Image (cartoon, rainbow, N blue to C red):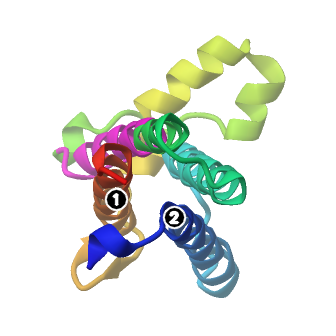
Amino acid sequence: MLQSLSPRIVFFGLTAIAITSIAFAMLYLEDQLGLAACPLCMTQRLFIVLVGAVGLMAGLHNPSGWGRRVYGALCTLAALAGGAVAARHVWLQHLPADQVPACGPSLEYMLDTLPFSETLSIVMMGDGNCADTVWTFMGFSIPEQTLALFTVVTIICLWQTLRSR
């Protein structure tokens, strides 16, 4: 059954997952619930958008053979990177209170005042804002749900990369 799915449909499906995820984050979590995204959340969103963009390009291009594998590998890399950031975020949320890093300046301030490489380093480390669990669904925090999403997307991307067709 899965083998009969066209690569184009799978890539467009990855794009639909990305669009749905970003729409949920922006329209529901931010607009409806009023939750502000921390720097690690924003970084995870970047990787979700990257997966969606690669999926869209691949779906429009409709490659076969090596082209499908290259697009699949790019999606896999983006999903793995996003999963690594989400895993770091989950780890921060499970630290004992006395080990949580201090809260830092806003992302906008850092981008305006610090070199990009330093801002990137600080963002990837996370801070006290990232350790707060502000919303859960079925007992899972937003970063835990995002880690699960990246895991599923990684599996789909790997399957797309390695399947024969």
Residue 151 placement, left or right of 160: left
Contact (Cβ within 8 Å) of mark 1 with mark 2: yes
The residue lying at 63 percent from left, 70 percent from top is 19
Precedes in sequence: disc 1 or disc 2: 2
Q: Amino acid at mark 2?
A: Leu
Which SS does the magenta portion mostly show? helix
Q: Residues within 10 Å of mark 1 (few under 14, many from 20)?
A: some
Q: Nearer the viewer, residue 66 or 34?
A: 66
Q: Amino acid at mark 1?
A: Ile
Answer with the quarter of the image where residue 67 lies.
Answer: top right
Q: Which mark is residue 14?
A: 2
| Quarter of the picture holding the C terminus | bottom left
Q: How many marks?
A: 2
Residue 59 sits above or below residue 69 on the image? below
Is 82 included in the stretch rendered in magenta? yes
- Looking at the rendering, the stretch of residues picked out in magenta corresponds to 77-95
The residue lying at 64 percent from left, 59 percent from top is 59
Instruction: Tell me the residue that label 1 is attached to.
Output: 156
Q: Secondary structure at mark 2?
A: helix
Q: CA distance from mark 1 to mark 2?
A: 8 Å
* Residue 149: % across, % down: 36, 64
Residue 108 placement, left or right of 53: right
Answer with the quarter of the image where residue 5 lies.
Answer: bottom left
| Quarter of the picture holding the N terminus | bottom left
Q: Nearer the viewer, residue 64 or 130?
A: 64
Residue 93 placement, left or right of 32: left
* Residue 148: % across, % down: 28, 63
Is 107 included in the stretch rendered in magenta? no
The residue lying at 59 percent from left, 65 percent from top is 15
* Residue 158: % across, % down: 31, 47
